[in-house]
Image (cartoon, rainbow, N blue to C red):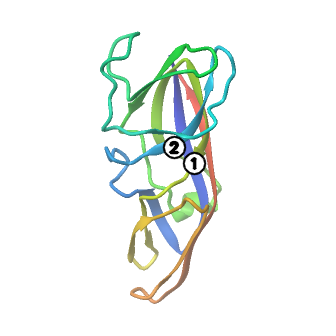
Protein backbone atom coordinates (compact mmCIF):
# COMPACT_ATOMS: atom_id res chain seq x y z
CA UNK A 1 0.00 0.00 0.00
CA UNK A 2 1.15 3.49 -0.84
CA UNK A 3 0.15 6.59 1.07
CA UNK A 4 -0.79 9.67 -0.95
CA UNK A 5 -1.15 13.08 0.69
CA UNK A 6 -3.63 15.31 -1.15
CA UNK A 7 -2.36 18.90 -1.00
CA UNK A 8 -4.07 22.01 -2.32
CA UNK A 9 -3.38 25.64 -3.03
CA UNK A 10 -5.22 28.54 -4.66
CA UNK A 11 -5.05 32.28 -5.05
CA UNK A 12 -7.02 33.89 -2.22
CA UNK A 13 -7.92 37.57 -2.26
CA UNK A 14 -9.15 39.05 1.02
CA UNK A 15 -9.92 35.52 2.28
CA UNK A 16 -8.23 33.07 4.61
CA UNK A 17 -8.75 29.65 6.22
CA UNK A 18 -10.14 27.81 3.18
CA UNK A 19 -11.20 24.30 4.22
CA UNK A 20 -14.00 21.75 3.86
CA UNK A 21 -17.35 22.99 5.21
CA UNK A 22 -17.42 20.62 8.19
CA UNK A 23 -13.67 20.71 8.85
CA UNK A 24 -10.99 18.39 7.57
CA UNK A 25 -12.43 15.24 9.07
CA UNK A 26 -15.99 15.95 7.92
CA UNK A 27 -17.53 12.52 7.37
CA UNK A 28 -19.79 13.85 4.61
CA UNK A 29 -17.20 15.78 2.57
CA UNK A 30 -16.70 14.07 -0.79
CA UNK A 31 -13.19 13.85 -2.23
CA UNK A 32 -13.46 13.52 -6.03
CA UNK A 33 -10.63 12.27 -8.20
CA UNK A 34 -9.82 9.82 -10.95
CA UNK A 35 -8.03 6.53 -10.33
CA UNK A 36 -5.20 5.04 -12.37
CA UNK A 37 -4.85 1.25 -12.12
CA UNK A 38 -1.38 0.20 -10.95
CA UNK A 39 -1.50 -3.00 -12.97
CA UNK A 40 -2.77 -1.98 -16.43
CA UNK A 41 -2.56 1.84 -16.35
CA UNK A 42 -6.27 2.37 -17.10
CA UNK A 43 -7.55 5.75 -15.83
CA UNK A 44 -11.18 5.95 -14.72
CA UNK A 45 -13.30 7.96 -17.14
CA UNK A 46 -15.23 9.68 -14.36
CA UNK A 47 -14.22 10.95 -10.97
CA UNK A 48 -14.69 8.62 -8.02
CA UNK A 49 -16.15 9.99 -4.78
CA UNK A 50 -14.68 8.90 -1.45
CA UNK A 51 -15.96 9.92 2.00
CA UNK A 52 -15.04 9.04 5.57
CA UNK A 53 -18.61 7.95 6.35
CA UNK A 54 -18.55 5.02 3.90
CA UNK A 55 -16.53 1.90 4.60
CA UNK A 56 -16.58 -1.20 2.47
CA UNK A 57 -16.67 -4.09 4.96
CA UNK A 58 -17.11 -6.76 2.30
CA UNK A 59 -13.96 -6.19 0.25
CA UNK A 60 -12.31 -9.50 -0.59
CA UNK A 61 -8.65 -8.72 0.10
CA UNK A 62 -6.56 -7.42 2.97
CA UNK A 63 -7.51 -6.35 6.47
CA UNK A 64 -9.36 -3.37 7.79
CA UNK A 65 -12.25 -1.42 6.38
CA UNK A 66 -11.38 0.68 3.35
CA UNK A 67 -13.52 3.63 2.35
CA UNK A 68 -13.56 2.30 -1.20
CA UNK A 69 -12.94 -1.08 -2.84
CA UNK A 70 -13.15 -0.98 -6.62
CA UNK A 71 -12.52 -3.34 -9.50
CA UNK A 72 -10.64 -2.00 -12.53
CA UNK A 73 -12.92 -2.09 -15.56
CA UNK A 74 -10.08 -3.20 -17.85
CA UNK A 75 -8.02 -5.80 -15.94
CA UNK A 76 -10.64 -6.53 -13.23
CA UNK A 77 -8.14 -6.40 -10.36
CA UNK A 78 -9.39 -4.95 -7.10
CA UNK A 79 -7.88 -1.91 -5.43
CA UNK A 80 -8.73 -0.15 -2.19
CA UNK A 81 -8.58 3.34 -0.67
CA UNK A 82 -8.55 3.98 3.07
CA UNK A 83 -8.73 7.57 4.26
CA UNK A 84 -6.51 8.60 7.19
CA UNK A 85 -7.94 11.69 8.97
CA UNK A 86 -6.23 14.30 11.17
CA UNK A 87 -3.85 15.58 8.48
CA UNK A 88 -5.62 18.67 7.08
CA UNK A 89 -4.65 22.32 7.46
CA UNK A 90 -6.54 25.41 6.28
CA UNK A 91 -5.22 27.33 3.31
CA UNK A 92 -4.43 30.76 4.73
CA UNK A 93 -3.89 34.01 2.83
CA UNK A 94 -0.22 33.91 3.85
CA UNK A 95 0.23 30.38 2.50
CA UNK A 96 -1.62 31.32 -0.69
CA UNK A 97 0.60 34.36 -1.25
CA UNK A 98 3.73 32.21 -0.85
CA UNK A 99 2.26 29.71 -3.37
CA UNK A 100 2.72 26.82 -0.95
CA UNK A 101 0.45 23.78 -0.78
CA UNK A 102 -1.31 22.64 2.41
CA UNK A 103 -2.37 19.06 3.24
CA UNK A 104 -6.04 18.18 2.89
CA UNK A 105 -6.33 14.38 3.39
CA UNK A 106 -4.10 11.31 3.50
CA UNK A 107 -5.10 8.22 1.50
CA UNK A 108 -3.70 4.71 1.95
CA UNK A 109 -4.09 3.20 -1.52
CA UNK A 110 -3.59 -0.30 -2.88
CA UNK A 111 -3.86 -1.13 -6.58
CA UNK A 112 -4.52 2.42 -7.75
CA UNK A 113 -2.92 5.82 -7.98
CA UNK A 114 -5.18 8.84 -7.33
CA UNK A 115 -4.97 11.49 -10.08
CA UNK A 116 -6.81 14.67 -11.09
CA UNK A 117 -8.45 15.87 -7.86
CA UNK A 118 -11.62 17.86 -8.56
CA UNK A 119 -12.70 20.74 -6.33
CA UNK A 120 -16.43 20.57 -5.63
CA UNK A 121 -19.03 22.08 -3.30
CA UNK A 122 -19.03 22.38 0.51
CA UNK A 123 -16.08 24.62 1.35
CA UNK A 124 -15.81 27.49 3.82
CA UNK A 125 -13.50 30.47 4.31
CA UNK A 126 -13.50 33.80 6.11
CA UNK A 127 -12.72 37.31 5.00
CA UNK A 128 -9.83 39.25 6.46
CA UNK A 129 -12.49 41.22 8.37
CA UNK A 130 -13.89 38.00 9.94
CA UNK A 131 -17.01 37.48 7.80
CA UNK A 132 -17.65 33.76 7.33
CA UNK A 133 -18.49 32.39 3.90
CA UNK A 134 -20.20 29.00 4.09
CA UNK A 135 -21.05 26.33 1.49
CA UNK A 136 -18.67 27.72 -1.12
CA UNK A 137 -18.95 25.80 -4.39
CA UNK A 138 -15.58 25.52 -6.13
CA UNK A 139 -16.85 23.28 -8.94
CA UNK A 140 -16.40 26.08 -11.49
CA UNK A 141 -12.79 26.62 -10.41
CA UNK A 142 -13.45 30.00 -8.82
CA UNK A 143 -15.50 31.92 -6.24
CA UNK A 144 -16.15 35.66 -6.06
CA UNK A 145 -18.36 37.59 -3.64
CA UNK A 146 -18.53 40.89 -1.76
CA UNK A 147 -18.05 41.11 1.98
CA UNK A 148 -20.84 43.55 2.80
CA UNK A 149 -20.70 42.89 6.56
CA UNK A 150 -16.99 43.52 6.86
CA UNK A 151 -16.98 46.31 4.29
CA UNK A 152 -14.11 44.51 2.69
CA UNK A 153 -13.59 44.69 -1.05
CA UNK A 154 -14.34 41.73 -3.20
CA UNK A 155 -13.31 38.29 -1.88
CA UNK A 156 -12.04 35.83 -4.48
CA UNK A 157 -10.74 32.27 -4.85
CA UNK A 158 -9.24 31.15 -8.16
CA UNK A 159 -6.34 29.23 -9.73
CA UNK A 160 -7.18 26.09 -7.73
CA UNK A 161 -4.39 23.51 -7.82
CA UNK A 162 -3.78 20.15 -6.20
CA UNK A 163 -1.17 17.45 -6.01
CA UNK A 164 -0.97 13.92 -4.63
CA UNK A 165 2.41 13.46 -2.93
CA UNK A 166 3.69 10.00 -1.99
CA UNK A 167 4.56 9.90 1.71
CA UNK A 168 6.48 7.23 3.57
- What is the CA distance from the residue labelled 1 to the residue labelled 2? 5 Å
In the image, is residue 168 above or below residue 48?
Answer: above
Which residue shows up at 57% across the image and 23% down it? 112
Q: Position of residue 45 (x, y in %)?
A: 64, 36
Crowding at dot 2, Cα within 10 Å, few <14 / some 14-19 / many 20+, comes out as some
Q: Position of residue 104 (x, y in %)?
A: 47, 44
Q: Position of residue 4 (x, y in %)?
A: 54, 30
Which residue shows up at 57% across the image and 15% down it? 76
In the image, is residue 38 above or below residue 142?
Answer: above
In the image, is residue 11 above or below residue 29?
Answer: below
Mark number for residue 32? 2
Mark number for residue 158? none
In the image, is residue 103 above or below residue 40?
Answer: below
* Left or right: 92 in relation to 51: right
Q: Earlier in the sequence, mark 1 or mark 2?
A: 2
Q: Which residue is mark 1?
A: 118
Mark count: 2
* Left or right: 125 in relation to 94: left
* Left or right: 153 in relation to 22: right
Q: Position of residue 24 (x, y in %)?
A: 38, 47
Q: Residue 105 appears in which quarter of the rendering?
A: top left
Query: Quick one: which residue is furthest to the right in this view?
Result: 41
Which residue shows up at 47% across the image and 43% down it? 31
Question: Element type at marker 1?
Answer: strand
Crowding at dot 1, Cα within 10 Å, few <14 / some 14-19 / many 20+, comes out as some
For the residues bearing labels 1 and 2, Cβ distance under 8 angstroms? yes
Which residue shows up at 38% across the image and 76% down it? 130
In the image shown, does 156 or 41 lie closer to the viewer?
41
Question: Element type at marker 2?
Answer: strand
Amino acid sequence: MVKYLLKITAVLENLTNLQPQGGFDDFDFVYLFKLKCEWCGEVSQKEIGVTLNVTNISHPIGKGKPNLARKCKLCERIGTITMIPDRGQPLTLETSESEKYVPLMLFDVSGYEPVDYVFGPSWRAESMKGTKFENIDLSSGKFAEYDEKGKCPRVVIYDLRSTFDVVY
